[in-house]
């Protein structure tokens, strides 16, 4: 799907449930990579730009960003019921898997192979995070302005170690005002 194509509007409640069950099932090490895959690439519910916008909104709202995003997407297609269905789908598989893995880990955590597997899973999660960031960056960072604000955010948080919340409260309004000002020139 190209960034300009519109997603389908006939997403059923069962689609929401099974889609977010998949997101939760595939979401080892974080669900950002699996949510992009299911929502944009597999189910085509949102375009890449719509996904990035929804994720951005989920990040500035209080709470977990992907929980917020799931709520927004569920609400978009079926209102409050859709939001509840999407959240149940998202949370069901991770909770079941977590209980099973915690039980197994408690029993076998002293084994060297289990320790090595835990480290390997962490490395895989880092790779998934970088892959998803790359996909989102290709969609969002298409203008010099976007690149400047991305670089400013990276420098502020990644290099200068400034608190993320304060950085967002400064750079988000600055980006919005700059974009508004630039569009007035067009």
Image: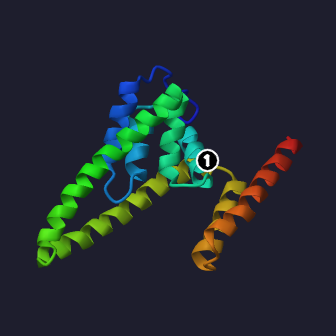
Q: Quadrant of residue 36?
A: top left
On the picture, is 28 further left or further right than 16?
Answer: left
Q: Nearer the viewer, residue 57 or 85?
A: 85
Say if 88 sits above or below 127 in the image: above
Q: Quadrant of residue 127?
A: bottom left
On the picture, is 82 further left or further right than 123?
Answer: right
- Horizontal and vertical percent for residue 89? 36, 39
- Horizontal and vertical percent for residue 149? 69, 61
Residue drawn at the location 35% of the way across and 44% of the way down: 23
Can residue 45 be seen at all in this image of the molecule?
Answer: no
Residue positioned most to the top? 10
Can residue 145 be seen at all in this image of the molecule?
Answer: yes
Say if 5 sits above or below 151 in the image: above
Residue drawn at the location 60% of the way across and 78% of the way down: 159
- Tell me the residue that label 1 is attached to: 57
Say if 43 sits above or below 130 in the image: above
Colour convention? rainbow
The total number of labels drawn is 1
Q: Quadrant of residue 4?
A: top right
Residue drawn at the location 53% of the way across and 28% of the way down: 79
- Horizontal and vertical percent for residue 153? 65, 66
Secondary structure of the residue carrying numbered label 1 = helix
Residue drawn at the location 33% of the way across and 51% of the way down: 27
Instruction: Characterize the local packing of mark 1: few (<14), some (14-19) or many (20 or more) Cα atoms within 10 angstroms.
Output: some
Q: Nearer the viewer, residue 24 or 131?
A: 24
Q: Quadrant of the C terminus?
A: top right
- Horizontal and vertical percent for residue 29? 34, 60
On the picture, is 107 further left or further right than 84?
Answer: left
């Amino acid at each position: 799907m190209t960034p300009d194509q519109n997603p389908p509007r006939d997403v059923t409640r069962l689609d929401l449930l099974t889609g977010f069950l998949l997101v939760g099932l595939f979401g080892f090490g974080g669900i950002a990579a699996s949510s992009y895959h299911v929502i944009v690439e597999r189910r085509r519910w949102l375009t890449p730009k719509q996904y990035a916008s929804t994720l951005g909104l989920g990040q500035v709202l209080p709470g977990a960003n992907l929980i917020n995003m799931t709520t927004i997407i569920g609400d978009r297609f079926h209102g409050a019921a859709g939001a509840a269905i999407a959240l149940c789908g998202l949370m069901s598989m991770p909770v079941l898997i977590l209980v099973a893995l915690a039980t197994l880990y408690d029993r076998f955590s002293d084994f060297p192979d289990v320790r090595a597997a835990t480290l390997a899973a962490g490395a895989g999660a880092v790779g998934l995070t970088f892959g998803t960031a790359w996909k989102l960056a290709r969609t969002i960072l298409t203008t010099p302005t976007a690149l400047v604000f991305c670089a400013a955010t990276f420098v502020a948080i990644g290099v200068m170690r400034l608190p993320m919340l304060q950085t967002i409260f400064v750079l988000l309004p600055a980006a919005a005002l700059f974009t508004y000002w630039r569009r007035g020139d067009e």
